[in-house]
Amino acid sequence: GIMQHIEDAGVHSGDSACVLPPYLLSGAVLEEIRELTRKFALELGVVGLLNVQYAIKDEVVYVLEVNPRASRTVPFVSKATGVPLARLAARVMAGEKLVDLGVQEEPPVPGVAVKEAAFPFNRFDVDVLLGPEMRSTGEVMGFDDSFGMAFAKAQISA
């Protein structure tokens, strides 16, 4: 799934709130992200999971990093979509085909899911300013039919 960070680039992805499905990206940008991701997976020979981080500025897509591995977002996307991504990836790595597992290209999200980071600021003496170093110690999910309510639920839970 394509997740959109809410904070600007420069905040560690583990500390950034994000939303699935993306709420402010144009159809053209989403299609370019899908196409670039397919190309990376094929060129790198990835069998299993692939994590790609992009930055978007004025409808131009920039690649920040490509990681042929699972990331901390896999459980979030799995919970939001109801698709057991880690299990499916393991089966694919063991030789099964996605088509035989009934996998669609991109699992639909039956609402809006917002991930928010949980921070230990009230327990530890750490700087509250977010940047490239990850400071969160956990994360929560807000889920609803609208972005606003999903975001509010995530904020209350964090």
Image: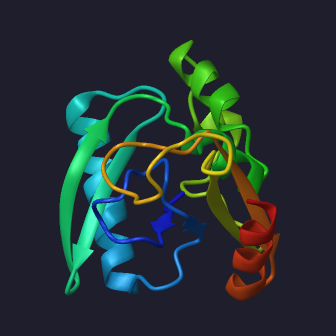
Image coords of residue 104 (percent x, y): 62, 53
For residue 56, what is the image quadrant?
A: bottom left
Choose between 130 and 7: the one closer to the eye. Answer: 130
Q: Is residue 90 something that shows in the picture?
A: yes
Check the image and name the residue furthest to the front.
Answer: 125
Q: Is residue 148 left or right of residue 45?
A: right
Asked if residue 104 lies left or right of residue 43, the reply is right
Looking at this view, is 101 or 22 the one in front? 22
Q: Residue at x 35, y 43 (%)?
A: 133
Q: Is residue 158 left or right of residue 50?
A: right
User: Which residue is at 66% across, 67% downward?
Assistant: 114
Residue 110 showing in the rendered view: no
Say above or below: 79 vs 150. above
Please identify the quadrant where the N terminus is shown. bottom right
Q: Quadrant of residue 29?
A: bottom left
Tell me where residue 12 appears, x and y as whole percent.
Answer: 38, 51
Depicted 135 relative to depicted 4: above or below: above
Residue appearing at x 35%, y 72% in the figure: 31
Nearer to us in this view, 138 or 49: 138
**Quadrant containing the C terminus in the rendered view:** bottom right
Q: Where residue 128 sits: x, y (%)?
A: 47, 57
Residue located 67% across and 50% down the image: 122
Where 145 sits versus 95, above or below?
A: below
